[in-house]
Image (cartoon, grey):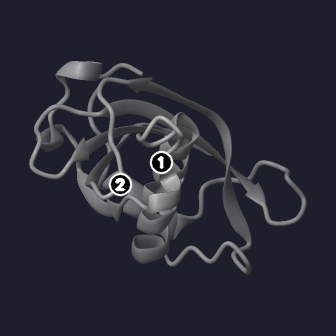
Amino acid sequence: MSGAGRNERRENYREIIQIPTRWMDNDVYGHVNNVVYYSYFDTAVNGFLMRQADLDYRSSAAVGVVAETGCQFHSQIAFPDTLDVGIRVRRLGTTSVTYEIGIFRQGHEDPAATGHFVHVYVRHGEMTPVPIPDKARAALEKLVVEA
């Protein structure tokens, strides 16, 4: 990820999605388990695509599948925190898109986590790469930031 990690701020993201934590997100240590952060990434990105590009993972001709993801943890979160998940696009290619993501506890400027997420668009049911659909590309272009 080319972002500043711990020094990121929510205003650096083009889209902010609110996600409430759930009781089941906490682990035995009383904080959100690290694997759940990836679920927040997925929820934010796919929620954006469903709202802005009419993505329907059951019937769309092309869908994005995760090819790569990574996360840096900066501070813990725990139920009942509500999160502001920021997304932006670092790279918009022909068949793939690289997102950068920041997870912020509501009311906090320092990120709890920062990460990245790569979607490769494939033909539904065949897993062969295809160009990003026009409607998705138009929505994603609004999230692009300069390198």
The local crowd at label 2, few if under 14, some if 14 to 19, many if 20 or more residues have their Cα within 10 Å, is some
Answer yes or no: is residue 94 visible. Answer: no
Nearest to N terminus: mark 2 or mark 1 = 1
Please determine whether, in this image, residue 58 is positioned above or below residue 85.
Answer: below
Disc 2 target residue: 79
- Name which residue type carries label 2: Phe
Disc 1 target residue: 26
Q: Nearer the viewer, residue 62 or 67?
A: 67
How far from the left and from the top, in percent, is residue 78? 35, 46
Image point (39%, 25%), residue name: 73
Answer yes or no: is residue 49 visible. Answer: yes
- Cα–Cα gap, marks 2 and 1: 6 Å
Residue contact between numbered discs 2 and 1, judged by CB atoms under 8 Å? yes
Q: Quadrant of residue 7?
A: top left
How far from the left and from the top, in percent, is residue 19? 35, 62
Image point (51%, 39%), residue name: 33
Please determine whether, in this image, residue 92 is positioned above or below residue 47.
Answer: above
How far from the left and from the top, in percent, is residue 136? 50, 64
The secondary structure type at the circle numbered 1 is loop
Q: Nearer the viewer, residue 97 or 103?
A: 103
Please determine whether, in this image, residue 110 is positioned above or below residue 97.
Answer: above
Q: Quadrant of residue 18?
A: bottom left
Image point (85%, 53%), residue name: 127
Q: Quadrant of residue 3?
A: top left
In the rendered structure, the answer to whether residue 57 lies left or right of residue 115 reads right
The secondary structure type at the circle numbered 2 is loop
- Numbered badge on residue 6: none
- Name which residue type carries label 1: Asn
The local crowd at label 1, few if under 14, some if 14 to 19, many if 20 or more residues have their Cα within 10 Å, is some
Q: Nearer the viewer, residue 7 or 124?
A: 7
In the rendered structure, the answer to whether residue 48 lies left or right of residue 128 reads left
